[in-house]
Amino acid sequence: MTGREDSVGHGRDVVPMAGAVAAGVGLALQSRLNGELGSRVGDGITATLASTSVGLILLLAVVPLLSAGRRGLRLVHAAVRVGELRWWHLTGGVCGAVFVAGQGISVGSVGVAVFTVAVVGGSAVGGLVVDRYWGGRPITMARTAGAVACVAAVAVAGHGVWRGPGVLALVALPVLAGVAIAIQAALNGRVGAVAESPWPSTMVNFAVAAVSLAVALTARVAFGGGMPGNLPAEPLLYLAGVIGVGIIAVATIVVRRIGVLLFGLASVAGQLAGAVLLDAITPGPRPSAATIAGVAITFLALVLAARTATAQPPRYRGHARCDDA
């Protein structure tokens, strides 16, 4: 690729990168809202099921009214019928359920900033692997160094909250959520490519996420867990579901252009800026010196991993190599 072609390619990446940053800001706000709702209800699963249901109801009301939505749903149905899409391509909502449940369970205890940095660590590693095996991008030294630096940032940022019973699990959960988000972005990008629109993929994602959360809640109650608490009446607390609709729609479009890893890295800038600001101005844990240091390490990781992130376009339109798994 010539220098001119490279500059044009990077120029075309500006808009999707800006979308990824905006999605990151949305993720930080969504984390705060789901965390607050989870604290009010006393149950992260119930809280996230409520906010996810709000997003699903909105999509069920709007997507069938859009010509692109109806056409996209027909294309997805046909692709599943002939085997162009495997059934597991439609399970991105399970990963989304893991992420939003992590928000509802962890944010109230560890804060948005620590939760976000932990998610960054998980999504960096997950994005590296997903881009390699589903997107055909090589695992280079720069990309690996960026992912390792993100993991180091998790350890540093979580330093002040490692002590106490159950705290390790509270930080480990968002790391797992970060891995889930990388997988979700790839799956939704695949479905969105077939649908030729982000809305059918987003609606399927929310439907699967709502069912997954409902099954998890039912299983917990059936095995002796506590009954769900009462939902608060403040409508603003349920905006997380609406914000999530925008995040998934943007991710579905952007990941096909810049790949899972770069989408995750670009969204980190928005997440970190929003997370630290929210922790600073809202009730709850304040950003500690360790958290700020973790943020700094994370930005270093972004620079390292992004050096080769746009070297070649992802190939999420083709079948994943693990189709036979």
Image (spheres, rainbow, N blue to C red):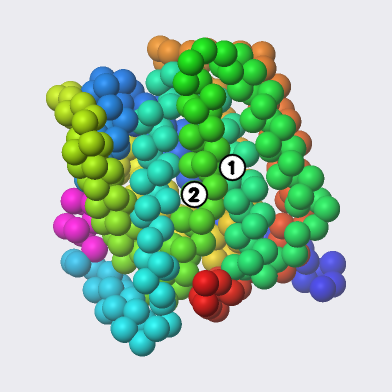
Residue sitting at x 45%, y 73%: 193
* Quadrant holding the N terminus: bottom right
For disc 1, the marked residue is 122
Q: Amino acid at mark 2?
A: Ala
Task: Identify the element where label 2 is drawn.
Answer: helix
- Closest to the observer, 211 or 308: 211
Indicate which disc, 2 or 1, sits on the residue closer to the N terminus.
1
Q: Is residue 30 left or right of residue 275?
A: left
Q: Nearer the viewer, residue 152 or 216?
A: 216
Q: Secondary structure at mark 1?
A: helix
Q: Is residue 318 above or below residue 127?
A: below
Q: Residues within 10 Å of mark 1 (few under 14, many from 20)?
A: many
Q: Main secondary structure of the magenta part?
A: helix
At 59% from the left edge and 42% from the top edge, which residue is drawn? 122
Is 21 magenta? The answer is no
Q: Is residue 186 above or below residue 115?
A: below
Displayed quadrant of residue 38 = top left
According to the picture, the residue beneath numbered tag 2 turns out to be 180
Most extreme residue toward the bottom is: 82
Residue at image position (84%, 72%) is: 2
Magenta-drawn segment = 54-63
Q: CA separation, marks 2 and 1?
A: 8 Å
Residue 291 shown left or right of residue 66 in the figure: right
Residue 232, position as x, y percentages in the image: 17, 24
